[in-house]
Amino acid sequence: MAAANRVFIARLAGLPVIDPNGDQVGRVRDVVIRERPPERPPVVLGLVVEIQHRRRIFVPIGRMLSLDAEAIVLSTGTLNLRRFEQRAGELLVLGELLDRRITVGAEQTTATVMDVAMEQIRTRDWEISRIAVREHGRPRLPGRRGHLRQVDWSEATGLARPLGEQGAEHLLAALGTMPPADLATLMLDLPPQRRQEVAAALDDDRLADVLQELPEEEQIEIITRLDEERVADVLEEMDPDDAADLLAELPPEEQERLLMLMTPAEAAPVRRLMNYAEGTAGSLMTSEPVILGPDATIAEALARIRDAKLTPALASQVYVCRPPAATPTGRYLGIAHFQRLLREPPSDLLGAVTDDGIDPLRTDSPITAVTRHLATYNLTACPVVDETDRLVGAVTVDDILDALLPEDWRETGRD
């Protein structure tokens, strides 16, 4: 790719950005272009690069020394770390152009933008040259969704108009397997309508993961514009504690409607969590930690904590309880720490390695007590029991951080 002077921009999404010393600065999240008079193609201004703490900065295209399929190398390590802010007349190629409906050619055929190519000219500047589109309305082969072709920028009409209904299929394809936290940050930088289109295009489980990373205001903005049955499906995919926190921001009558649309099995733990007083262990905990009986083997415990869906904090402990194994469980017996599990024969029983020396928290324990408990015993999570010593959940260190940080911490972290 370094030798070529034409690059399709969707292929840049997620590429590492490297400084002259070979150190990674961040990753490409978008490309900024600016329109010019109709007879001249838009000029590429630079890259939106995500650096540490999810901050997005602008890197002028002139700083790009080379690019290939593996990385973009910069000519200098000195960068302006001010947060990127889009200016009037600028367009984000991935965020605003992909999936846009336009017309192409003299016949004004309706088409959808699938990708946009930039090309380096003799002045060393980069301009937009070609657009990959899927045309609609032409005869097509069975199973095909439209005729694919490339057109010159000058043949396209509608790229500069205000956003209409756009969809998000190709934007999401370009972003691939971006972590939910990063996708949430990208969505915060999109115009509200585009943000809603992306949310509507996400699968239920992916949208649930992203919502958990968004500030409450944006969570509410998104779900209130979705069909209630879709919202209920997404709530079922969320962690019960996050679903309870989101529902708590809605009016009581809306809470009840959504809970009634959820399956009883998924709604029950959410209802229980909503009953605990704010600022207590009960209100902070998740009701779905890893739980096994004392007669389970260490091999079974290790298999459970390998689940990729578990957060590192939850995967650090297995809670040993009498049946039933779903919260609220039978009597709580203790913790099996994952480091201890790694040191013991896989065929041994869990009951033999259970630590019962650390008292669990109570559902009404205040957040100050929870924080002291985690710090005292150097834990990333701790069990929570009710008045009859049944395990009802676990509080993790990320739950505590969410509660202790300012409400707008996601926003301030991007400044």
Image (tube, rainbow, N blue to C red):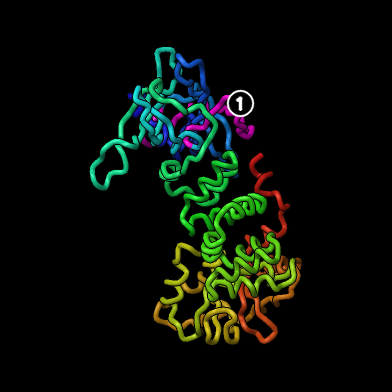
- Locate residue 131 relative to residue 310 in the image: left or right: left
Left or right of residue 278: residue 73? left
Where residue 209 appears, as percent x and y from the top left, is 53, 57
Magenta residues span: 67-94
Q: Which residue is mark 1?
A: 88
> How crowded is the residue under tag 1: few (<14 C-alpha within 10 Å), some, or many (20+)?
few
The answer to whether residue 367 is seen in the rendering is yes
> In the picture shown, does residue 144 fall above or below 46?
below
Counting the numbered discs, the total is: 1
Q: Is residue 312 visible?
A: no
Could you tell me what secondary structure mostly forms the magenta stretch? loop
Picture quarter with the N terminus: top left
Closest to the observer, 356 or 391: 391
The location of residue 236, given as percent across then percent down, is 53, 66
Q: Secondary structure at mark 1?
A: loop
Q: Quadrant of the image for the C terminus?
A: top right
Which percent across, then down, holds residue 138? 29, 36
x%, y% of residue 227? 55, 57
Q: What amino acid is labelled 1 in the image?
A: Ala
Q: Is residue 179 left or right of residue 374?
A: left
Q: What residue do we see at 72% from left, 58% from top?
A: 404
Residue at x 56% of width, y 26% of height: 90
Tell me: residue 228, above or below residue 277.
Answer: above
Where is residue 400, by image quadrant? bottom right
Residue 68 colored magenta?
yes
Residue depicted at x 55% and y 64%: 232
**Residue 29 shown in magenta:** no
Q: Residue at x 51, y 80 (%)?
A: 353
